Image: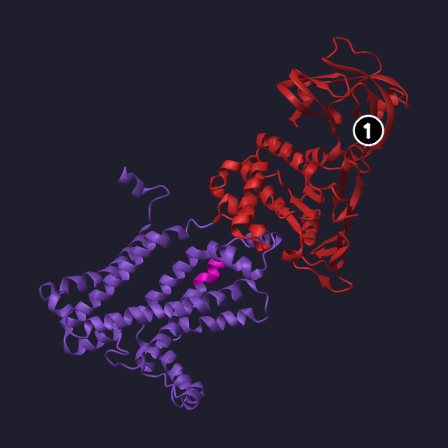
């Protein structure tokens, strides 16, 4: 049965597509296997309880979650404006918003530094008026992660809004709902699976954020040293420790993905 | 007049120019082919589309007045709308769907749910309140949509092809129910449909629209009897006769009997298409079961046929070719025999 299906018919894969696809799978999966193979399982316990690991992990989880929260609060309304409003220059706005998607994160970090640093346009004013300095603080980590990750949320929520049937919103309007009520009671529940998917993407991107963070927030254990930074640093002096830290990040990412897939993402495809 | 509207909209190549007046308690059917501008009219009345010109006034209150720069947004209009594919909110229960309009207009949750339950009882779906729309049949969903539109006690009820997404059997029962609710509705109703039977069965007045313009207007029977264009004749050429089903016979309310192909019982509407009626100068031999003596009371030529208005125990419309009309030397007052095959007669529950 299986062989017959593989040879011909609709389910068969032509060789020019099959070979690159197999190579691609190997390319994506083998490094992860390598990571598992090289993991020093016997020292796992002591490595995990080493000082700094818990600290870096906690900082990573907290800052990625905060960045996701900020992205939700600001990004969902932005996605609505892009998808539903008729303001002029929407195309330009969308292009601007997606720039951080293609911008090398280091460049983002430099840009943030130039604006929010002590000598920056906004940063100097914050410093003089309120005595607030942002660079090299946990706040800077959250800002850097938000800068890099929010576009992922905006793009996926905008996609969900475009795919959702806008006539439900018209029906709500004929039932006396103004645009804000319609947004809260109709639009938001309809695109909830899309928002959840966007939030997961955003969170995962924030969790792995490296370039903008190290540029704008620096690498101070306890305040700005997130897991990716700790992994990079560990690789220089203690490769085994780097492997363990990487494994922790891998497990956290996969666990989050699986957890949310069961609860939310599985419904994204079935959403009306 | 409860609704007075002059609507001018340019939609691509289609220029919509429709004047509409609907009294309190009146049902106006806007009948026409797809793309005639019917839905555009409804969207303007709902406020979902701003007209390019004209005005919309309900109970003396201007909803749209292009010259004066007035455009009331949809949520500020006291209206209820039923859509072709019901558009019940999939994430809300049936009760919360019906309560939605009451909540947005300021009712408390408990109060709105109680009122919604009352409306669900009126459409005979009281025990489905906890379901989600996806768990309803098409007919049930459309009845919930009607309850949702009526629950806000609107001044204007807009029905956009409310029956066309339903299968034939469901359409009959929902149409009968819709008729009952429209009878009890005190405001103005505008029904958009491309199905002449919906228009005949539900409306007090019919507006036939083609290419954005009114082709003909009047009571359904009048429009059917005196079609002004070929298009209207084809569209609304139906004799609709109320009666009571008794097996394969229908006893008409106005007297007389009609033989039908299907068994029926209870109140029904009998529909006869004019092209299925044959006219004879004498009683035909081996008479079919449906043979009636009639008197020709009027004749309107359109195209190659003549629509004949027939009075008698069973009032009918008949289309005959212009040639045979001339051959029989027909003139008003002529006594004739009309026959129709039982299989050509459609029966609808009412």
Residue at image coords 58%, 43%: B145
Q: Quadrant of residue B348?
A: top right
In this rendered view, identify the residue nearer to me: A80 or A97. A80
Label the purple chain with its letter.
A
Is-magenta flag for residue A101? no
Q: What element carries label 1?
A: strand
Determine whether, in the image, residue B133 is placed left or right of residue B347: left
Q: In which quarter of the image is residue A135?
A: bottom left
Colour in which chain B is drawn: red
Residue at image coords 14%, 75%: A238
Determine whether, in the image, residue A97 is placed left or right of residue B120: left
Visible in this render: residue B81?
yes
Residue at image coords 74%, 41%: B25
**Chain under disc 1:** B
Q: Quadrant of residue B195?
A: top right
What residue sits right under mark 1 in the picture? B307
């Amino acid at each position: 049965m299986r062989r017959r299906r593989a040879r011909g018919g609709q389910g068969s894969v032509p060789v020019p597509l099959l070979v690159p696809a197999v190579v691609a799978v190997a390319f994506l999966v083998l490094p992860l296997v390598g990571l598992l193979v090289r993991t020093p399982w016997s020292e796992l316990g002591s490595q995990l309880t080493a000082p700094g690991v818990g600290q870096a992990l906690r900082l990573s989880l907290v800052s990625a979650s905060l960045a996701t929260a900020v992205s939700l609060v600001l990004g969902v309304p932005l996605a609505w404006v892009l998808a539903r409003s008729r303001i002029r220059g929407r195309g330009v706005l969308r292009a601007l918003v997606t720039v951080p998607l293609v911008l090398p994160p280091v460049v983002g970090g430099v840009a943030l530094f130039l604006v929010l640093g002590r000598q920056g346009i906004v940063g100097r004013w914050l410093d003089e008026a309120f005595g607030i300095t942002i660079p090299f603080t946990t706040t800077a980590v959250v800002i850097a992660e938000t800068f890099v990750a929010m576009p992922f949320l905006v793009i996926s929520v905008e996609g969900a809004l475009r795919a959702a049937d806008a006539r439900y919103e018209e029906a709500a309007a004929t039932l006396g709902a103004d645009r804000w009520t319609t947004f809260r009671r109709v639009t938001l529940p309809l695109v909830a699976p899309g928002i959840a998917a966007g939030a997961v993407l955003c969170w995962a991107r924030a969790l792995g954020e490296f370039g903008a963070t190290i540029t704008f927030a620096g690498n101070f254990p306890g305040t700005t040293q997130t897991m990716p930074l700790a992994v990079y640093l560990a690789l220089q002096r203690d490769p085994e420790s780097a492997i363990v830290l990487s494994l922790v990040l891998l497990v956290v990412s996969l666990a989050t993905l699986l957890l949310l897939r069961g609860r939310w993402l599985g419904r994204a495809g079935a959403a009306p | 007049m409860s609704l007075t509207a002059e609507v001018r909209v340019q939609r691509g190549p289609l220029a919509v120019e429709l004047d509409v007046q609907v009294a309190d308690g009146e049902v106006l059917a806007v009948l026409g082919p797809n793309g005639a501008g019917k839905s555009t009219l409804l969207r303007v009345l709902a406020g979902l589309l701003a007209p390019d010109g004209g005005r919309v006034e309900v109970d003396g209150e201007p909803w749209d007045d292009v010259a004066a720069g007035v455009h009331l947004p949809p949520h500020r209009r006291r209206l209820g709308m039923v859509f072709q594919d019901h558009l019940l909110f999939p994430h809300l229960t049936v009760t919360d769907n019906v309560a939605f309009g009451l909540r947005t207009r300021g009712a408390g949750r408990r109060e709105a749910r109680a009122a919604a339950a009352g409306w669900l009882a009126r459409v005979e779906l009281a025990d489905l309140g906890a379901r989600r729309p996806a768990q309803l049949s098409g007919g049930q969903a459309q009845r919930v949509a009607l309850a949702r539109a009526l629950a806000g006690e609107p001044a204007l009820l807009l029905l956009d092809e409310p029956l066309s997404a339903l299968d034939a059997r469901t359409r009959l029962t929902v149409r009968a129910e819709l008729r009952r609710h429209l009878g009890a509705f005190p405001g103005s109703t505008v029904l958009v449909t491309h199905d002449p039977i919906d228009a005949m069965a539900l409306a007090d007045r019919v507006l036939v629209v083609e290419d954005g313009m009114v082709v003909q207007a009047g009571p359904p029977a009048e429009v059917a009897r005196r079609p002004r264009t070929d298009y209207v004749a084809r569209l609304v050429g139906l004799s609709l006769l109320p009666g009571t089903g008794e097996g394969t016979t229908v006893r008409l309310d106005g007297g007389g009997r009609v033989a039908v192909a299907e068994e029926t019982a209870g109140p029904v509407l009998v529909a006869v298409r004019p092209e299925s009626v044959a006219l004879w100068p004498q009683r035909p031999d081996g008479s079919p079961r449906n043979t009636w003596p009639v008197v020709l009371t009027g004749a309107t030529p359109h195209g190659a046929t003549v629509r004949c208005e027939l009075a008698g125990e069973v009032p009918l419309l008949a289309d005959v070719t212009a040639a045979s009309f001339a051959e029989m030397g027909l003139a008003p007052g002529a006594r004739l025999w009309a026959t129709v095959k039982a299989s050509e007669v459609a029966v609808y529950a009412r």
